[in-house]
Amino acid sequence: MAGSDWTCDVSTMREWESPDYEPSLPVSEKSNPLTRDIDRASPNHIVRMLQACDSQMFQEEEGTTYQRLLSDNVVITMMEVAERVELILKDPQDSLVVLSGCGTSGRLAFLIASTFNRALRQLKQSSVYSYTIAGGDRALLSSQEAPEDDPILGMLSLKKVCEGKKRVLFIGISCGLSAPFVAGQLDLCLQHPEVYTPVLIGFNPAHQARDEPIPGCTFTFHNVVERMQELSKSQMAFLINPSVGPEAISGSSRMKGGSATKILLEVIMSVAHAAAFSKTPITSKGILQHLKASEKTLDITYSQTEGISGLVEAAGKSLRCGRRVCYLGWGSPAVLGLIDASECNPTFGAAFEDIRGFVNGGYRELNNSEGPLNSLGPEFCIAHEDFVHQVLPSLNDQDTVLLIYTHSDDVSEVMKMARRVREKTSNLHAVYHHVDGDTATALQEDINKLCLSTLKVSWPSSASASSLHMQWELSTKLVLNAVSTGAHVLKGKIYQNYMIDLQVTNSKLYRRATRLLQKLSGRPEAQCEETLLKALYRVDKLTPDITSSDMTAHILTARNTTKVVPLALVCLLTGCSLEEAKSHLEQQPIVREAVEAFLT
Ligand code: F1P
């Protein structure tokens, strides 16, 4: 693949929509036919594959299989939800809009709540948005996957933020319609309709919502969705669940799932704000225009394929030789850097030092509800000063540093930082967003000279300041998702388009790991789960203690173990002992090659 030219035809774009394509899996867990060979692709091909996958978000509905982002039903429900937000904006007394989710979904809930509270402050209006995230604020910056499985925790954290409120619009986000934390919150809303109106955002059709029993609960996610569907007929609940196609790396909902979440919610809030404060009625036409503007954001971003590929290549080289990648950002796009970096641990089993994000102003800029979290450890140190103290002294040319800034930032500060980094590494790059017609200042040119490459993204000057910021953020998300995903692909962490070395730290990931072992080894489910447990507990024979423990105990153990799935796979393929599998993986740490050696 690496040398060949990569093109994608219409039939490959839509192949996943066929009812025969991986029928047992929900869309969010299917593998994308477009990226089957991403593990062998060049940086340029990787970026083009990601572009093709992202463009699936805006594909028109065809037939009746899946509703899409631009489908009438979706647009109408977005209007209805926007009307509910408008009501709260006009009469905020004792009311709240709560956004909530796990992992990336929770981080985006935080980001969107912050953006629109800021907009309200600027208009001298009181804040109406709040957020909850499984695991609390530490989950904004690190993986906290066990709390995602806890519906009671979800319910309690929702109750806490809503204390004293008489009217709450609750927006739960679970890309896979699967997180028990969110299911618990939706159930609370359904039990108290006098206070709560529930909205669910996700990217599977309702019948594909997860139907696995939740320990200690009488309902599954699927049951909750069914109850919501019933209530949606009388607009007492709302379900926004277009399909956006399978992720480029199977199940990695931080990518399209995250982008679509950001797009949907920002469109809803933007039209609601315009209705409440500038007398612009909420119409389907208005919603469609906003959605189309997001599609344009994708086009503008991916028109820089060459530049993005260069960044992927640089980051991949750094990771391959065990060095690091740092995102140093200013303003809200920097927060997307924090988010992207935080996802690399659960997604790729990366160490927190591998890819790190820093934001100018640290927690002051983040403005999260629990305040500064530095005391929790070095991975929670996010300010540029922290970068200067903790990271800068040890940088060399093998590390990649990426500056992320816009024309509205203080360019002299960017310059200062660029100079300091340049003293340690020449491997400095920049992503710079500016508006059309803006001419580069001398300082700007000097920054460009210090950088090996600058991705200059130009945006139409006609856009309002708030929509420009949202475009910059989405564009930064796409670029950084490409950088971190592409770099890990080049590091050899992906097999075909599956992440094999995934952390088995919650029930969704435990099931995904078992399924992956089945697929790659062709062995029965029971044998795969047994081998997974052996690898997880590092034993060649399962003890009664292990077999009598439940999944929660396995997941807790998984937090402290590495290479669980690759080890299990080698054992399954060869019948060797764990020790032998371990020594094999030590000799061949590139998981793809280790696995391939056995498969061929
Ligand atoms: C939530 C989530 C993902 C993360 C990982 C574990 O998924 O935390 O954000 O990347 O897959 O699950 P969802 O509830 O939004 O489907």
Image (cartoon, rainbow, N blue to C red):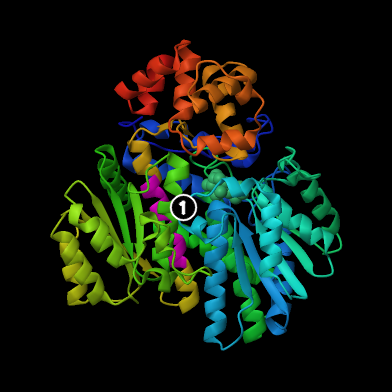
Residue at image coords 78%, 50%: 224
Q: Is residue 385 left or right of residue 7?
A: left
* Amino acid found under the numbered disc labelled 1: Ser
Dot 1 crowding, Cα within 10 Å, few <14, some 14–19, many 20+: many
Residue at image coords 19%, 67%: 447
- Expressed as whole percent of the image width and height from the top left, the position of residue 92 reads 70, 82
User: Where is 252 relative to 278, above or below?
Assistant: above
Which image quadrant for residue 136? bottom right
- Expressed as whole percent of the image width and height from the top left, the position of residue 288 reads 62, 65
Residue at image coords 30%, 55%: 326
Is residue 106 or residue 403 the one in the foreground? 106
Judged from this view, the residue extending furthest toward the front is: 545
Picture quarter with the C terminus: top left
Q: Secondary structure at mark 1?
A: loop
Q: Is residue 235 magenta?
A: no
- Expressed as whole percent of the image width and height from the top left, the position of residue 416 reads 20, 71
- Expressed as whole percent of the image width and height from the top left, the position of residue 423 reads 13, 60
Question: Magenta residues?
Answer: 471-484
Q: Main secondary structure of the magenta part?
A: helix
Specify whether tag 1 is near ligand 1 (CB below 8 Å).
Answer: no
Judged from this view, the residue extending furthest toward the left is: 423
Is residue 121 or residue 32 the one in the foreground? 121
Which image quadrant for residue 492? top left
Is residue 84 or residue 146 the one in the foreground? 146
Q: Determine which residue is flagged by label 1.
A: 142
Is residue 553 or residue 55 the one in the foreground? 553
Q: Is residue 479 magenta?
A: yes
